[in-house]
């Protein structure tokens, strides 16, 4: 059955889950009302968890423990009044018993625990009460409640050495009255609460001999189990193992009992008749052996008793007594085994012994009945074992811990209360002294203050008022102890009245004077005049007064004239208190008229527009910035945090459509500051609104233009970052598309009339014109909205209605895809710099199409953003290309130059080492090392004007490959060398004409010889010689001699075996420009002078440059 229920529950849960999924995923396809996801989730949640909760509740209510709890609560509610009455009576009797014990002098102070307490437990009619009454103990108080039925009430018996509580017999079975279980548990809780250290010292269980004689084993077993339940409940609630004494009453019903014991003396009748267990644990006691020993002892006395008995019949009973007792023992053992022994789930009970008793019947009328064998059992055994019960150690520790915590907490509370009382008294005394001092100080300050006092002095007085008032309030309401023990007269109203009077007479006048001064000096400042007039009028017109505005106004003014922040703060507090008062100030009307006249000079519409904007200030919380919509792509831009007020967004515009005209009407109706009329006609209001809207859209454009202009694309220099940036900008979720989408949402706006026109279908063109007129009267001018749309048309047309790119933007993305492919290929390039060089070269040569063609068609901001990206990528390519050129330069040019030319003549004209002509030829010739490098790596990127030494870099989609001026000059110089000393066929060599031009008068002859060419000059005819360089052998000798008038050689210069001899001769002499592009060689030494004229291709080399002296920069 349980399995079937579980299977059914699982089926229900699975079914509800499936139904919930159907509601979430299938229902929206069938029912329109289920389109909303939140509604579907709610329904699904209710179905699934409703089913689950129902199943759990059914299972919970089906449990046995739940049913029992409900039944107990039902029973308690049913017998509530009766239970309440019996509980009250039980509690009363228990408390009365405690009072009696405490009051009795015999028990002294420790009455509650001084005497042991015993429960006398047994069924009705088992002789419990008789056992206690006739036990032979002395009951000095003899307390017994006669008002309660013997069968219903708890009875207390007070002996000199113990207290007995006689429990009604029906609490064992708890079947007589429905409320018995509740009363029983309350009784146990009462004992555990009032006598928690040791609730009871033992239990005397009385069972009459009739119970064992007349009941079957089954009945005894049930009875034993009921008793065991009660004993377990006692042990559990009292947290202890309680000694139990089984007393079998009415033993005289055993055949032969009276005859066997009738000869006993008085002392012997007080002895113990029964068995006492040596061990506290029943498991360690063999009851059968104990009974056998008891019967053996009885048998040992049978012969003597028979001999002393005269009646024949009694002898027979004496003889059979032990046999009857032995037969009875088996039932007793069976009963104790069930009731007290250890089981799988229960601990053994502390059964201390089994005893027999009976009320003595042969007594005279003057004597009280006595219970046989009870007196010593109680006094010598039970009372002596009063403390034998074992209290649970954990419970004892918990109780002790609780006591320590309680006592400690109590002491701490007392100490804290004492401390606070003393501290409160001391503080109060100190505050009274302080209060007195502050009052004196206040009076002193008040006496010094007058209308001429400045704000700082006034602030001190007002602050002192607040200090005194706070102290006075402190004295009245400082803490609980002050309120209870220390009284203080309430002077707060008096202090407040004086304070308010000073506010009105001093602070208000000072503030009004300040506002009036502002009105006079700020007449030329519209914004300040507006605020000054508004604040001034508000002091007079109470219904127009805005406390917040006046508070901010005065605080801003005080900041300008008062340096102390503390004084500013104090005045702000006093001003706020002043504004809470009811007052009306008589303002000066001529000042108001003058300020209004100045305000009206400015456009009234502009004034109203400013007020109109302020009414929508709450929309600033919904301001727009591109950082909010770009998300994780925000890092790609700068300027994303520029805030566009919420009024100038689509959401703000929608609110303007609804509330714009209404807000303006409110402003016009309350435009009291400038004194304009309020009752405007409908047309006048419409005119105002049209002008306001024009201002609105002008600001709308300005904010969005500034937002777009503030956006700049971040540039990267790393290839990975560049590729990543390109990939993001080319993705379907490109930030540019996001920007354009939000721009279109917020600028592609329509007026109400346009919305209505668009919503009307083509079939319904006969709409009443009055409908359009009605909408037009209360809506925004369509032309203003249209102008905004047209202004951003170039941007908005880049996206379709679904905000997907189209037209030119698609073309731009295609062009950028090519750039991305180029950059992506470079990312996997083996030689990045070389590839960069060829990309730039191919672009210059036209092998790669221009990158800016489509970009030039874009709106300015799109062009700026993507242009920045292009330039960043081109910068990267150009930088790497230049690095490649530099590497080639170092490898092909610099290495040769450093090894074979530098530091050699004529490259370095101070060097003694000559450059080899072949090396010189190889470096400078056409298509030589330097020229070849220029043609291969440089010529594509620059154009050189050799005449003016000016270079122009070619444009590479807005970028340029630039080179240093030093390098350009080296190129120009190399070209001049090539033209000067190289022939037209490209071979090294040139020819020049040389002729003498001057010889000083102290000389007779000059002789110049170069190889076989000799040129003599003696102040006569001038003859020219033609010289060629280099000669066939590449070795030249040059001689230069000067002869004085005696034909003696006075100057002789010789340069021999040197292929650079002619150049060295030129370098040693002073050169100057001659006529007709000739070169003058001037020699002067020791007063002797001579000069020659050279004409030929090398002349420009020396005129424009420093001859063959040449240098190359290490970089480009």
Image (cartoon, rainbow, N blue to C red):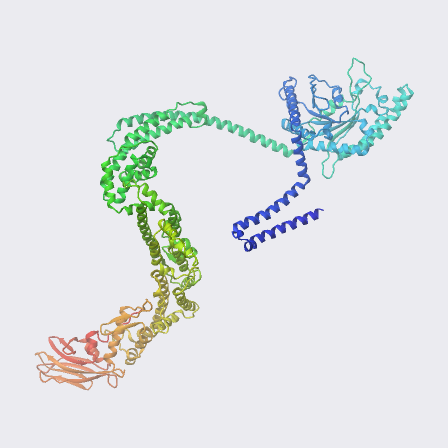
Q: Quadrant of residue 135?
A: top right
**Whole-percent x and y of residue 906?**
24, 76
**Whole-percent x and y of residue 463?**
32, 31
Q: How many marks?
A: 0
**Whole-percent x and y of residue 949?**
24, 72
Residue lying furthest top: 366
Asked if residue 971 is positioned above or below residue 131 in the image, the reply reads below
- Please indicate, yes or no, whether residue 285 appears anywhere in the rendered image: no
Query: Which residue is found at the position 40% from the left and 23% from the top?
Result: 488
Q: Is residue 258 left or right of residue 487?
A: right
- 774, 58: nearer the viewer: 774
Asked if residue 496 is positioned above or below residue 882 in the image, the reply reads above
- Please indicate, yes or no, whether residue 892 appears anywhere in the rendered image: yes
Asked if residue 1071 is positioned above or below residue 647 in the image, the reply reads below
**Whole-percent x and y of residue 350?**
73, 31
Asked if residue 697 is positioned above or below residue 216 in the image, the reply reads below
Query: Which residue is found at the position 68% from the left and 17% from the top?
Result: 141
Q: Is residue 88 left or right of residue 640?
A: right
- 496, 892: nearer the viewer: 496
- 684, 77: nearer the viewer: 684
Q: Is residue 67 left or right of residue 332?
A: left
Q: Quadrant of residue 142?
A: top right
Q: Quadrant of residue 888?
A: bottom left
- 59, 36: nearer the viewer: 36
Quadrant of the image for the C terminus? bottom left
Q: Is residue 1113 left or right of residue 755?
A: left
């Amino acid at each position: 059955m349980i399995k079937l229920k579980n299977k059914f529950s699982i089926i229900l849960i699975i079914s509800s889950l499936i139904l919930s999924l159907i509601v979430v995923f299938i229902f929206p396809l069938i029912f329109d009302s289920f389109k909303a996801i939140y509604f579907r989730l709610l329904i699904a949640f209710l179905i699934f968890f409703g089913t689950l909760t129902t199943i759990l509740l059914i299972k919970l209510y089906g449990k046995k423990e739940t049913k029992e709890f409900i039944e107990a609560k039902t029973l308690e509610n049913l017998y509530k009044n009766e239970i309440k009455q019996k509980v009250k009576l039980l509690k009363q009797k228990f408390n009365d018993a405690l009072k009696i014990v405490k009051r009795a002098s015999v028990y002294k102070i420790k009455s509650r625990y001084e005497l042991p307490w015993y429960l006398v437990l047994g069924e009705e009619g088992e002789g419990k009460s008789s056992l206690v009454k006739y036990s032979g103990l002395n009951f000095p108080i003899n307390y017994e409640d006669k008002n309660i039925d013997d069968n219903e009430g708890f009875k207390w018996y007070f002996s000199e050495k113990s207290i007995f509580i006689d429990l009604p017999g029906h609490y064992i079975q708890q079947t007589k009255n429905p409320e018995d279980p509740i009363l029983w548990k309350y009784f146990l809780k009462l004992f555990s609460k009032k006598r928690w250290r040791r609730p009871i010292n033992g239990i005397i269980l009385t069972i009459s001999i009739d119970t064992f004689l007349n009941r079957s084993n089954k009945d005894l077993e049930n009875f034993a189990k009921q008793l065991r339940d009660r004993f377990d409940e006692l042990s559990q609630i009292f947290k202890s193992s309680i000694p139990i004494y089984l007393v079998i009453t009415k033993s005289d019903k055993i055949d032969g009992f009276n005859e066997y014991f009738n000869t006993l003396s008085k002392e012997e009748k007080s002895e113990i008749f029964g068995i006492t267990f040596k061990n506290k644990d029943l498991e360690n006691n063999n009851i059968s052996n104990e009974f056998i020993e008891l019967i053996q002892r009885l048998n040992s006395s049978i012969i003597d008793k028979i001999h002393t008995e005269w009646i024949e019949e009694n002898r027979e009973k004496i003889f059979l007594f032990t046999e009857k007792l032995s037969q009875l023992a088996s039932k007793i053992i069976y009963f104790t085994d069930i009731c007290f022994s250890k089981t799988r789930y229960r601990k053994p009970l502390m059964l201390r012994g089994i005893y027999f008793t009976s009320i003595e019947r042969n007594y005279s009328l003057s004597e009280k009945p006595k219970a046989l064998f009870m007196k010593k059992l109680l006094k010598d055994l039970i009372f002596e074992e009063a403390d034998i019960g074992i209290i649970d150690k954990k419970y004892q520790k918990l109780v002790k811990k609780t006591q320590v915590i309680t006592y400690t907490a109590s002491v701490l509370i007392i100490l804290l209360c004492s401390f606070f009382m003393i501290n409160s008294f001391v503080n109060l005394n100190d505050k009274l002294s302080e209060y007195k001092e502050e009052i004196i100080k206040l009076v002193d300050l008040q006496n010094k203050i007058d209308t001429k006092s400045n704000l700082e002095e006034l602030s001190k007085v007002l602050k002192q008022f607040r200090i005194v008032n706070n102290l006075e309030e402190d004295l009245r309401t400082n803490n609980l102890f002050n309120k209870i023990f220390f009284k203080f007269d309430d002077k707060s109203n008096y202090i407040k009245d004086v304070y308010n009077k000073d506010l009105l007479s001093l602070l208000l006048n000072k503030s009004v004077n300040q506002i009036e001064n502002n009105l006079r000096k700020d007449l030329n400042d519209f914004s300040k005049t507006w605020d000054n007039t508004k604040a001034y009028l508000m002091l007079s017109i109470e219904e127009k007064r805005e406390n917040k505005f006046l508070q901010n106004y005065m605080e801003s003014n005080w900041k300008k004239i008062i340096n102390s922040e503390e004084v500013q703060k104090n005045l702000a507090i006093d001003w706020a208190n002043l504004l809470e008062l009811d007052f009306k100030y008589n303002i000066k009307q001529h000042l108001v008229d003058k300020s209004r006249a100045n305000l009206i000079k400015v456009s009234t519409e502009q004034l109203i527009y400013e007020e109109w904007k302020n009414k929508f200030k709450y929309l600033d919380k919904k301001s727009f910035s591109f950082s909010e919509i770009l998300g994780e792509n925000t890092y790609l831009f700068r300027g994303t945090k520029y805030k566009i007020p919420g009024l100038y967004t689509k959401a703000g515009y929608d609110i303007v459509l609804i509330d714009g005209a209404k807000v303006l009407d409110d402003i016009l109706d309350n435009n009291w500051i400038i004194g304009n009329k309020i009752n405007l006609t409908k047309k006048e209001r419409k005119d105002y609104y049209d002008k306001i809207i024009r201002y609105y859209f002008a600001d709308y454009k300005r904010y969005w233009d500034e937002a777009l202009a503030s956006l700049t694309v971040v540039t990267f220099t790393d290839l990975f970052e560049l590729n990543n940036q390109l990939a993001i900008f080319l993705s379907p979720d490109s930030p540019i598309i996001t920007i354009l989408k939000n721009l279109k949402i917020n600028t592609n706006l329509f007026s109400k009339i346009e919305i209505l026109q668009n919503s009307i279908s083509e079939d319904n063109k006969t709409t009443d014109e009055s409908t359009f007129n009605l909408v037009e009267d209360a809506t925004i001018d369509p032309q203003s909205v249209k102008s905004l749309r047209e202004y951003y048309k170039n941007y908005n047309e880049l996206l379709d209605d679904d905000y997907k790119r189209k037209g030119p933007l698609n073309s731009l993305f295609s062009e950028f895809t090519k750039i991305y492919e180029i950059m992506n290929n470079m990312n996997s390039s083996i030689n990045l710099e070389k590839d960069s060089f060829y990309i730039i070269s191919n672009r210059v040569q036209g092998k790669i199409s221009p990158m800016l063609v489509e970009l030039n068609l874009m709106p300015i901001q799109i062009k700026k953003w993507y242009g920045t990206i292009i330039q960043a990528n081109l910068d990267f390519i150009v930088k790497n290309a230049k690095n490649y050129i530099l590497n080639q330069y170092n490898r092909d040019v610099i290495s040769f130059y450093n090894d074979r030319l530098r530091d050699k003549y004529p490259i370095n004209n101070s060097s003694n080492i000559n450059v080899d002509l072949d090396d010189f030829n190889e470096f400078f010739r056409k298509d030589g090392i330097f020229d070849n490098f220029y043609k291969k790596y440089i010529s594509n990127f620059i154009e050189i004007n050799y005449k003016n030494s000016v270079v122009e870099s070619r444009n590479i989609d807005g970028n340029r490959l630039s080179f240093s001026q030093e390098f350009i000059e080296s190129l120009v110089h190399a070209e001049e060398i090539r033209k000067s000393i190289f022939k037209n066929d490209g071979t090294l060599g040139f020819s020049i004409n040389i002729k003498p031009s001057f010889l000083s008068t102290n000389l007779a002859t000059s002789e110049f010889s170069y190889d076989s060419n000799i040129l003599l000059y003696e102040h006569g005819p001038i003859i020219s010689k033609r010289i060629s360089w280099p000669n066939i052998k590449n070795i030249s000798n040059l001689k230069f001699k000067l002869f004085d008038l005696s034909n003696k050689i006075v100057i002789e210069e010789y340069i021999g075996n040197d292929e650079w001899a002619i150049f060295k001769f030129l370098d040693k002499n002073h050169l100057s420009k001659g006529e007709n592009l000739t070169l003058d060689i001037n020699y002067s030494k020791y007063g002797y002078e001579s000069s020659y004229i050279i004409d030929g291709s090398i002349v420009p080399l020396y005129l424009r440059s420093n001859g063959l002296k040449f240098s190359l920069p290490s970089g480009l």
